[in-house]
Image: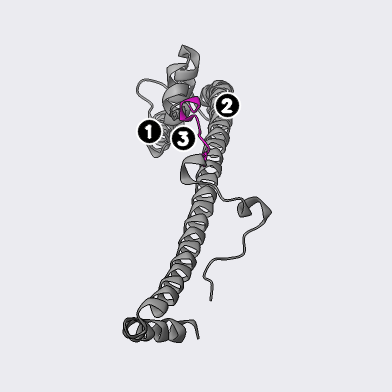
């Protein structure tokens, strides 16, 4: 029983291993992997750095606690203090004005930081796409090599089977010639060959 799978028309043409041309891939066309964080940080302007710093500080528990303590001290000072005079008595108009200024300037800083982060996310997505494209090309190249290796293995197996058939034919011819020259020697040779033939026959069955 043959162990070689059926070859298609393209694979039916026998080629020697030296005639096989494996696909080559130019790995140099793929540039190095880019660290988007470092690339984005190197191109930051002074305004963007300030906006990131402000947004980072305002979006922290430290800022909330400090601002809460300042507001509490402000309200207590202008509520119970009477010796130096209350510079912002109830309803704390100056405090409301200061908080309005803070909100008016904090919002643009936060939006600048968010816009920069959105641009950074876009660059990250673009870099991920480029990296995935490189990986896809590398995998395609690997699969082409594997296909060629499979074809080569099938050709080697087919060549071994053909060689085995030729050896069996030559052996039979030699036994036929030997039986004509020396029948007794031919019978002894057939006895030595019979166990091997029975083993092969049992394996095929």
Tell me which numbered mark, 2 or 3, is placed earlier along the sequence. 3
Query: Badge 2: how crowded within 10 Å, few (<14), some, or many (20+)?
Result: few
Along the line of sight, the residue nearer the viewer: 59 or 174: 174
Assess whether mark 3 and mark 2 are in contact (beta carbons under 8 angstroms).
no
Image position of 183 (left or right of 9):
left
Identified at 51% across, 40% down, the residue is 19
Q: Residue 150: x percent and y percent?
A: 51, 54
28 magenta-colored: yes
Tell me the SS state at disc 1: helix
Q: Quadrant of residue 118?
A: top right
Tell me which numbered mark, 3 or 1, is placed earlier along the sequence. 3
Q: Residue 121: x percent and y percent?
A: 55, 32
Q: In which quarter of the image is residue 144?
A: top right
**Label 3 to label 1, Cα distance in Å?**
12 Å
Tell me which numbered mark, 1 or 2, is placed earlier along the sequence. 1
- In the displayed structure, 5 sits above or below 94; it is below
The residue identified by callout 2 is 119
**Disc 1 or disc 2, which is closer to the eye?**
2
For the magenta stretch, what is the residue range? 20-30
In this orientation, does residue 125 appear?
A: yes
176 magenta-colored: no
Tally the marks: 3
The residue identified by callout 3 is 59
Which label sits on residue 66?
A: 1
Residue furthest to the right in view is 9
């Amino acid at each position: 029983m043959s162990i070689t799978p059926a070859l298609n028309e393209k694979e039916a043409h026998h080629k020697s291993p030296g005639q096989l041309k494996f696909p080559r891939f130019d790995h140099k066309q793929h540039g190095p992997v880019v660290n988007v964080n470092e690339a984005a940080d190197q191109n930051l302007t002074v305004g963007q750095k300030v906006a990131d710093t402000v947004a980072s500080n305002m979006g922290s528990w430290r800022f909330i606690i400090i601002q809460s303590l300042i507001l509490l001290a402000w309200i207590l000072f202008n509520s119970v203090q009477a010796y130096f005079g209350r510079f912002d008595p109830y309803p704390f108009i100056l405090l409301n004005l200061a908080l309005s200024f803070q909100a008016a300037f904090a919002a643009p800083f936060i939006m600048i930081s968010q816009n920069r982060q959105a641009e950074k996310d876009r660059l990250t997505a673009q870099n991920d796409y480029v990296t995935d494209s490189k990986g896809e090309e590398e995998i395609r190249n690997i699969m082409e090599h594997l296909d060629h290796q499979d074809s080569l293995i099938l050709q080697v197996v087919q060549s071994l089977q053909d060689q085995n058939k030729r050896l069996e034919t030559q052996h039979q011819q030699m036994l036929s010639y030997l039986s004509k020259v020396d029948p007794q020697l031919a019978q002894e040779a057939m006895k030595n060959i019979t166990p091997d033939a029975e083993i092969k026959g049992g394996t095929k069955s």
